[in-house]
Image (spheres, coloured by chain):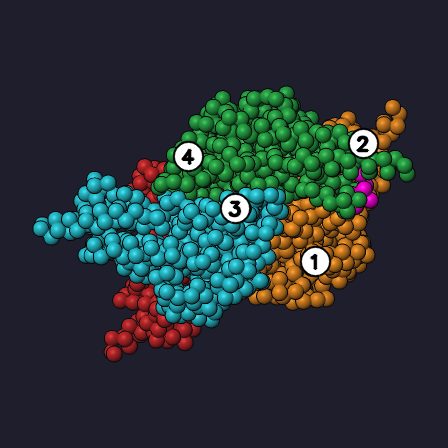
Chain colours: A cyan, B green, C red, D orange
Amino acid sequence: MHFRSDNTAPAAPEILAAVSSANVGAASAYGEDTWSKRLNAAYAELFEHDCFVFTVATGTAANAIALASAAPPWGSVLTHRESHIECDEGGAPEFFAGGAKLALLDGAHAKIDAPAVEKHLRILRHGVHSPLPAAISISQASERGAVYRPDEIVRLSATARREKLALHMDGARLANAVAHLGCKPADVTWRAGVDLLSFGATKNGALGAEAVIVFDSKRAEEIARRRKRGGHLMSKGRYAAAQLLAYIDKGLWLSLAARANALATRIGAAADVFLSAPVESNQVFIRPGVEGLKELRAAGVEFYDWGAEGSGEARLVVSWNQDEDDVEQLCALLGALKRSVVQF
Amino acid sequence: MHFRSDNTAPAAPEILAAVSSANVGAASAYGEDTWSKRLNAAYAELFEHDCFVFTVATGTAANAIALASAAPPWGSVLTHRESHIECDEGGAPEFFAGGAKLALLDGAHAKIDAPAVEKHLRILRHGVHSPLPAAISISQASERGAVYRPDEIVRLSATARREKLALHMDGARLANAVAHLGCKPADVTWRAGVDLLSFGATKNGALGAEAVIVFDSKRAEEIARRRKRGGHLMSKGRYAAAQLLAYIDKGLWLSLAARANALATRIGAAADVFLSAPVESNQVFIRPGVEGLKELRAAGVEFYDWGAEGSGEARLVVSWNQDEDDVEQLCALLGALKRSVVQF
Amino acid sequence: MHFRSDNTAPAAPEILAAVSSANVGAASAYGEDTWSKRLNAAYAELFEHDCFVFTVATGTAANAIALASAAPPWGSVLTHRESHIECDEGGAPEFFAGGAKLALLDGAHAKIDAPAVEKHLRILRHGVHSPLPAAISISQASERGAVYRPDEIVRLSATARREKLALHMDGARLANAVAHLGCKPADVTWRAGVDLLSFGATKNGALGAEAVIVFDSKRAEEIARRRKRGGHLMSKGRYAAAQLLAYIDKGLWLSLAARANALATRIGAAADVFLSAPVESNQVFIRPGVEGLKELRAAGVEFYDWGAEGSGEARLVVSWNQDEDDVEQLCALLGALKRSVVQF
Amino acid sequence: MHFRSDNTAPAAPEILAAVSSANVGAASAYGEDTWSKRLNAAYAELFEHDCFVFTVATGTAANAIALASAAPPWGSVLTHRESHIECDEGGAPEFFAGGAKLALLDGAHAKIDAPAVEKHLRILRHGVHSPLPAAISISQASERGAVYRPDEIVRLSATARREKLALHMDGARLANAVAHLGCKPADVTWRAGVDLLSFGATKNGALGAEAVIVFDSKRAEEIARRRKRGGHLMSKGRYAAAQLLAYIDKGLWLSLAARANALATRIGAAADVFLSAPVESNQVFIRPGVEGLKELRAAGVEFYDWGAEGSGEARLVVSWNQDEDDVEQLCALLGALKRSVVQF
């Protein structure tokens, strides 16, 4: 039973088909092909706003390039202590941003809020001696599966505007968040004040397709330079573009995400008292203790331990094509585990 | 008639099929899938030597990551003045290598040789004040379509060893070079003293599959770190790996390259006195003058101008799936152009 | 009354005299002069160990260069949350180290200990995805004036050795720490396991003289390269070297530091209940509240606020040449302030 | 006889006296002292224009910081092949500029001109693939002792303006150039279109005092950040500032330079046919052959070989305090050498 990561799933048939369809005839290289050229318009329609879409190979690249263009080398990016950019990207943001710093904030369920940002900004600064707060980065959904409501983002962006900070969103699981909220993509991005978006499709059904999206042409030129410089301007751009087009065609991205969310919710209900975070996307965090995790593993459930050694916490991720039987079996195992714990 | 770049071609059916075949079931992420895990062994067989294969998104990334691990930030990489790493990668090598320098050498047909390297090394150096020569980078085939013979590489690597320089090969068109030489892949790589290889499949039939290959495990750990940090460790690694496996299966890479080479040779014969470089791969460089190029363009031939403004030189690239009729038509156009020039 | 910083003091007469004495005749440039060449031997005697002394312009440069040579770009440096390298160096460590991260630990009085390091190391890591812990950096004395005893450093270095971390010491106020401990310089540096030392003389009586000191020749070559590359290899090296030689001649550095420490201790006694950290060097931290600080300022005492806005905390620093009358007056003001607070 | 470098000379008595005079009382740290605060006004008077003066430790730092603020990481800086920033700074410009490239131009006597710049700009560029020409850097005087006339700089800056390039001047020997030209400092800097100036005093009589000077406040903030980040914001800023104030007081800088220039001219006359560059500053380049250099060395003349191994060329540098007897003796040796060569 694979609950390790949504990265373990294959690609959705619609997206693979789009890649195959794109494999015909000559096409200009380096983003001048017809697929790539349709991206901006297609995403502008989705987001109800001008969009500049820069495909890159990974979510790490999307985040790193976006942040590098949002913060100078002497700047700091305010983000949650458990964010992907801090914990899981091998220092890519610092690399691309020429040594900019991540300033780590606390917040429930890996979300940060405006007061946390403001508290950080009240630390005494001394001109050039101190890092310059330059950007805020939030993950939608968060690293603990929680989702920012539009009003929460609006409050963050109001602070950002006032303090001249850019607002970046790591949308590796944006589909799951939007499906959960039932809102428009715009409601949690530009309309809520997001300046730079890492848009991920890989976890939710693509073979490998990620993008930096900016909503203002003034930000585009630098992203283009940084993408090339990072080795992320693909020569045969049509394949990534075809994936990103198919991904949002006829709402595919949201229907895939909604299915995964629903199954996660079912697991969350079964996990019940073990839950260590609310289930608002396709991730379920449980803390049944070290022994409990051992039992689940012994029963064939694959997952990642979470937190520090011996925390007894785990992350279970539901993929777009997750087998329902696996979900049922996991729910049963969690039910049994709860009963056994109660007996003690 | 597309002779602009081999990057404009689609993927070979065998390689697309491999991607489709890989799209089944769950697979571990980040290079722990079964396709990725077979890469080292498959390439070890191809190269008759231990291989450590690191897939990345682009040739630019392969070059930049390889060079960054071969030269310290205060080092210099000796390369041809017209090399891809100098002219076409938006500064990626300098970015990944933390500001290392490219030292530009001259040489016929974009190849460098041991005497050119030695001449450069005889420039007076003053300890920490001077850049530290740290690596040599050659392109096989070169940016002007020329191919290094094994003995030429051996002579370069002998100098490299003596001077403690690493030897890197940009193998974006390695297939074309090996097909031209009719040698073993080993003969122009590790056996000739190459330490780090950028292995390209995209131009010659893949959708998008490039790799850094090193032949010594001691170099592997740093490449792994630099790949992640550059945003090039793909989450669903199976698709790039499947491409790289299919690419070398049953000699596909060489048969695709041999076909393109043969068509290029045919064009070269037709171009004749216009040739500005020998035709040893799938690239043809001609210098029929500004007016001559205008005529070709007017006749529907697509290509890149080369060199400086008004040089009257052009590059014609033959793709793995180039239409033979297009080649015939181009040959006819070149023939007519020659005659018209002779008349003047 | 200047208690803002020990950087506001002029240079000690002995050190200025050394600079004047060095201003005679021709001397080889870039560290080949006779003063610079005596540095290693003079410091080897002081530290009872081989020493490789690299003068640089500032303590920021010393820290940044030392850390860059101790941690790879993908590494992390474990340090206290309030350390100078984190808060006051404008991102210089990240810049020199190519984007390495600072991992922030807690600990009383801006000191960290082995358990805090070990707790950090127990956070689950995932190979190349996670920053690689590479070095520990401690400040002697700390940013809150506290001093590490030799046994505390030994415990840290034991952990460092076991976990393959380098141990760096920011010794901007090493003189004050050694004077406080009454130990040998070796006891808190190499003998306790310190690998790289930022040795500061500026705050304690030099015009401007800082150095990176390493105790192992294997570390020297890279420091030399990084120093040049950072613009810190001075052409007329004799002046910085002359300062560093005079600074340790006949124990000058320790007698200057001891005097400042003694006056700080006197202030600490007067501050009494206001103290927010023990007085172990030439720094005194007090927390008399926002109103209390206003009164001190109104009375002409100059100092820095500390912590966050409105924390009501302040740092008072005693310089090597601090006027004793100023100290007396400050003590009187603190006494009055205590009494007024008690009345409320 | 020291003709190795002007960096071997001590400091002028007026400048050392200024340092001693500054060593009194408390002074605010980090450039807030009264000496530092007078710099902008003093240099504004000298340059007849607003000036923002940022002291740094070395000329290498001044160049690197200035160029980093003039070119983005993906930019290129056009400079002479033999420039100091290319050959003698250990890669500092690339380091500070985040991996920007130096594009090397040819030109007599290490000077470049507008046609050379324009020729470089005509190389075909392909958007993000190609480095972006971003700045021109010239050395006044050049690395071969030649001096740019105001009209030559004006022509370069006209091209720079048109092509949106910043114009940087490495003024490590600006005093010698201005003394040679007999012009106003403004005539070869801002008035001729220079945007960023590395102003050097060390070679011409300071202990160690260099600065980045910009003439437009818009450039100042970034320089300030980069200086701190490079570890070049000195805590006791008064000493460097006092040097820079004394250096230009009552024309000291020009009288020191004029004397050195005059002696160099005398040597140039004696060197005669050996001269390999015109003598326009305090540097003399001769090419008497390998044997000739051996003889000079045997006679006790100290100098640097120049160019490649076995070039038979040398650089002789005259310092501000050069002994006239040494000059006479050198002239006699050169005279004898010429006669012996003629005999062969």
Residue drawn where x is 66% and y is 33% of the image:
B282
Q: Position of residue A15 (x, y in %)?
A: 45, 48
Identify the residue under disc 1. D164
Q: Is there any visible trace of residue C22 in the rendered image?
A: no
First along the sequence among labels 4 and 2: 4
Identify the residue under disc 2. B273
Of residues D182 and B51, the one nearer the viewer is: B51
Q: Amino acid at mark 4?
A: Trp
Secondary structure at badge 3 equals helix
Q: Position of residue B316 (x, y in %)?
A: 70, 38
Secondary structure at badge 1 equals loop
Of residues A182 and C89, the one nearer the viewer is: A182
Identify the residue under disc 4. B35
Bin the neighbour count of mark 4 within 10 Å (Cα to Cα): few under 14, some 14-19, many 20 and up.
many
Is B82 positioned to the left or the right of C344 in the image?
Answer: right
Mark 4–mark 2 contact, CB under 8 Å? no
